[in-house]
Image (cartoon, coloured by chain):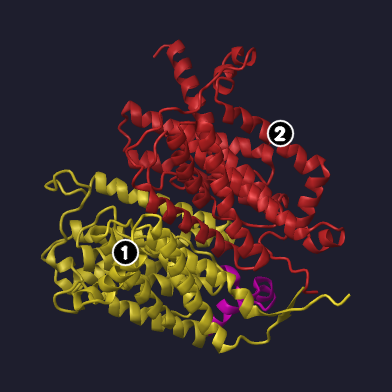
Amino acid sequence: MDGISTYFILITLLFSAVKSGTIILLPTIGEIFTERSGVLNLGIEGMMLVGAFFGFVAAYLTNNPYIGFVVGMLSGGLLSIIHAVISITLQGNQIVSGLALTIIGGGITNLYGYHYTDLRLTSTLKNFPIPFLSKIPFLGPIFFNQDIIVYLSYILIVVMWYILYKTKIGIHLRAVGDNAKAANAMGVNVFKTRYFWTFFGGLLAGAGGAYLTIGYAPFWLDGMTFGRGWIAVALVIFSMWNPLYAIIGAYLFGSIDALQFQLQAAGTNIPSSILQMLPYLITFIIITFATIFVRLKHIGVPKELAKPFSREEK
Amino acid sequence: MFIFERRESVPLRLKIMIPIISIIIGLIIGAIAILFLNVDPLQVYKAILIGSFGSRYAFTETLVFATPLILLTSGLILVYRMGFWNIGAYGQYIMGAVFSSYFAIFGSPDLPKFSMLFIMICAALLGGAFWAFIPAFLKALWDVNEVITTLLLNYIALSILRYFMYGPWRDPTGLGFPLSKQFPLNAQLPRIIPNSRVNLGLIFGIIAAVIIWFIINKTKFGYELRVIGGNPRAARYAGINVASKIIIAMLISGALAGLAGMVQVSGVLRVLQIEISPEYGYTALITSWLSYLNPLIGIFVSILFGAFTAGGYLIQITMNVPYGIIPLIESVILFMLIGGEIFKNYKISYLKRSF
């Protein structure tokens, strides 16, 4: 294979790696903030499925991908409110509630989804090059010839990083997750903060799911997130609860996903079941090493993660 | 404002009422969900009831679906008692099925039935335990989050199963379907009720539930598990070796899940295929919680959920209502159950502000 075609294959690969990575980047950012506020929501997989499905349905019925995206996002947010009520107000077990969220997401989408299997979206998100930036060799065609959601995700990362570390909102958020009692004494409303960031996490999980059907694979397939929600949960630890590091994890996952997809399309001798295993296997290895690293450095973990707060109980 | 008073003990009335109310609310929300399909929910529930308890055959099918659930639930209860979040029962179940199927597919069909089944059971226990050992070891050694590792291992196990089914273990005479050859007679777990698929696995399940109940309530190991579940730090100060307890409990839990997988392929399906579980892994999580982490109650809750599964399959065929309604109802029940915990832990009363 000559140099020029290798170059183009690599660009195509990394271009779809960014798209595939975005599906998982959005939920990861959302969950980072949910967990920072002290709420553990393991229901990302369920919220993503609901976002993917209702996003698809709305985009299909209105023939407008943007409406679809918003609907998918809101449906993820709506589902997260159940988790918020159970874990914040009723102080129920957050792990079990998150798993129930995953199960209900699979149930709802399976129940209503079979009418929509065999359909395809006719209008999906359009790619448009950003002037000047898209002309940068190598990086331009990979990062700056994408669709609006990918561009918004770049902005989102920077904005969320800024909010977390440089604003009062971020200080309050981190205080609530690290020491709810002290935050309460400071005058921060622990309940409101946790409700808001849980809802925010739900919106972004729904957005990730919606991007899957609207921006990546324009059809509906039962259970089509295939564990991406769980990989997002793992990436939160990998990123050490910092939105900037989430990019690395998400695009790394996107690259593996894109690579296994291209290898399958190219018809290698490696069985597809083994290729499909790769993202999970690599996430598994990464999460193990990331945990060891986090423990060695004692960083990141919100100190009161998954611990309910009760103002009345002194 | 609301006043929360911590309860010293939970009244029995609440312990019974909360699950019942949870199930009723689950069914009501399920009914609303069915209405959106333009189907009469009462007809659907009637069909589920008929499909699970309506005839002798229906009831035996309920027991067939309950069998792996009893084994899985017992295993999960053991580790949930110590606060170890094994979500990987599904993967351990698959590995049990894969390990034992190897002998059914490639073993000699002339081997005496008892020896063959004994080997298969040992292989299943080993396969499940092996798959459970990985996350337990990582948790014990480096505190790697077991929710994530056990879940990822589910997907990895499923890929391994798919690999065998599309590759070396596929039946060459099977028209290309991803199925193994039919298990020979000596690899088929005996059925214990005539004209039904109820098999010896049901007995295994009941024995396992009793043993797990005994371990939890009557042994030092069980006591230590409960201490760890209550407060891991206190357990460490009390001199309990938490790491080794995690590993032992997970080996038992995984072995039981593996046995459940073997029971399903050897006693019910009698081939190895990709679809070997109607979401048993998640369902067992719900049954564990619904039975208050008591394996003996778990037997009856498993039968109830076996009925849901049997009925769910029926409505899919006869009424064209997708199976998704079952996990939907089950998860609402779970939400209600954990949301209802607050009424068990606190006495809540309303007080008008007097200032």
Among the 4 quarters of the image, the one containing residue A184: bottom right
Q: Seen in the image, is A275 located left or right of residue A312? A: left
Q: Seen in the image, is B168 located left or right of residue A74? A: left
Q: What SS does tag 2 mark?
A: helix
Q: What SS does tag 1 mark?
A: helix
For residue A158, which numbered disc appears in the image?
A: 2
Marked residue chain, label 2: A
- Same subunit: marks 2 and 1: no
Between marks 2 and 1, how big is the CA–CA gap? 47 Å
For residue B312, which numbered disc appears in the image?
A: 1
**Is residue A293 among the parts visible in the rendering?**
no
In what quadrant of the picture does the N terminus of chain B appear? bottom right
Residue visible at 37% across and 64% down in the picture: B280
Amino acid type for the residue under numbered disc 1: Gly
For residue B227: magenta? yes
Is B19 in front, or is B110? B19
Stretch of the chain drawn in magenta: B220-243
Q: Position of residue B245 (x, y in %)?
A: 54, 72
Chain A's colour is red
Is B83 in front, or is B116? B83
